[in-house]
Image: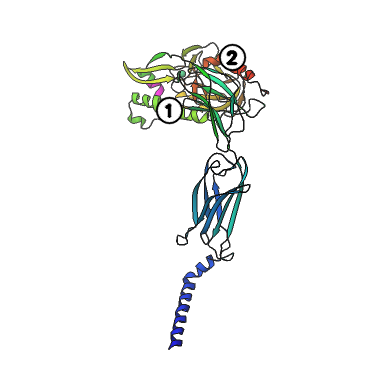
Amino acid sequence: MKKGKSQAKWILVLAAVVTLAGAGGWTFMTRLEGAAPVVRIDPPFSAVGAERAFTVEAEDTGSGLRSLSVSLLQGEKTVVLLGRRLDAAAGEGRVRETLRLAAGEHGLSDGPALLRVEARDRSWRHWGKGNPVRMERQVRIDLRPPVLQVLSGTLNINQGGCGLVIYRSSEPCPVSGVTVGDSFYPAQGGLFEDPLIMATFVALAYDQGKGTPITVSAEDEAGNQARIGLNHFIRPRRWRQDTLEITDGFLTAILPGFTASIPDAAARPPLDQFLWVNRELRKANYEKIVELTRTSDNRLHWHDAFVRLPAAASRAMFADQRVYRYRGQEIDRQVHMGVDLASLAASPVPAGNRGRVVFADDLGIYGKTVILDHGFGLFSMYSHLSQIGVHAGQPVQRSAVIGRTGSTGLAGGDHLHYAMMVGATFINPIEWWDDHWIKDNVTDKIAAAGATAKTGD
Ligand SMILES: [Zn+2]
């Protein structure tokens, strides 16, 4: 009896093994897989400041993950950031952990360290401990923020005007620049032989008055930030009021040029079409200008005052506060962000100064337009052209003819809409036509920085 019972037990065990072997042959195979997990760090970094957040990800598509650990080693010190055994029941094949590394809190000091990520899978290999992977990265602990020193002195700036800011950073910083109110002007090296000397033009928008805060800031590779106030003096300006009477004749003349871009144009009365162009298309065109001026060459392409369209009368000024009226009623308000210069029809348009063409195409309300990059954030823009004579990417000389005046876009007659920008902020071009202003605010600032300026052009 006893023997029979024992046999029955063995038969049951055998049956179980056979069943498992059928359904579980697969399990048996995956348990012997020899592929180690894959580990990743995002973002990859090479420096750690006071604090650094990052994610570590491990994946094992074969047998699943058994453990994941992250540690930082410096000298005799080992800081364990993560030591995780993974639940077998969960059968996790992929794990993602967000970690915060506070170098200061862990007593680490400035200098090199080693970041180590280790993982094992659930394979039966390596005496049942699983396939191991170890990833090591050299990182630099840097707890010191960059030190900033302004070299261009007090910034005297007009409302709607421009200035040049030059400063030196104690170490290379991937993010560095000047903040004016809520606008950031990224600074670049390249104006001086010393690559740590940064420069950028900055603007005070037409609507940024006295009391606008101006700061210089930088963030080093390790994420340490520095911010200092910039001594400045703001001269406030008042802008002109201007009334524009919109006539049916004007609408009949300009609207056909916009029909293709106005949604449901046929269903809208002419005035409604005009308002869409004056508001929505204007906004969309500005977005394009923002995109085009996001980066600027880190060389001063130009010297001497900018060239104004010759023998031209100023028809509208920078920051004119325009009120649009139709049949005696106010219908809209916009601000005129350039100077309108009228000469003979189809007059040749000279490049204001040396630069590089960044745009030469149609730009909605601005019509046929050319935009030039003059370096360190400074741009000039020529609109309503009847003809464009340059193409994007091309370098142009001061006074070179880049097109001819016209009335393309939202223009009542042949004229040049001349605008200047620092980044995407429109500025008053009048400063740039003035030798004295350029000497005081650009040339003398570069000379006073007390460093060797790069030459070449
Ligand atoms: Zn204009």
Give the class, few, some or many, for how many residues have Cα within 10 Å of label 1's Cα (few <14, many ≥20). few
* Part of the protein shown in magenta: 251-255
Which secondary structure is most common in the magenta stretch?
helix
Helix, strand or loop at disc 1? helix
Image quadrant occupied by the C terminus:
top right
Residue drawn at 55 percent across, 18 percent down: 154
332 or 184, nearer to the observer: 184
- Rendered-image quadrant of the N terminus: bottom left
Query: What amino acid is labelled 2 in the image?
Result: Asp
What residue is shown with label 2? 440
User: In the image, residue 265 lies at what x, y percent?
Assistant: 36, 30
Q: Distance between the residues labelled 1 and 2?
A: 35 Å
Q: Look at label 1 and name its amino acid.
A: Lys
Question: Mark 1 or 2 closer to N-term?
Answer: 1
Q: Look at 43% across and 22% down and name the residue there.
A: 410
- Name the residue that disc number 1 marks: 283
Residue 422: x and y, percent?
52, 23
446 above or below 105?
above
Q: In this view, does 88 lie above or below 360?
A: below
For the question of whether residue 404 can be seen, the reply is no
Q: Nearer the viewer, residue 68 or 262?
A: 68
Which of discs 1 and 2 lies nearer the camera? The answer is 2
- Mark 1 C-beta closer than 8 Å to ligand 1: no
Q: What element carries label 2?
A: helix
Label 2: few (<14), some (14–19) or many (≥20) C-alpha neighbours in 10 Å: few
Q: In this view, does 141 lie above or below 237?
A: below
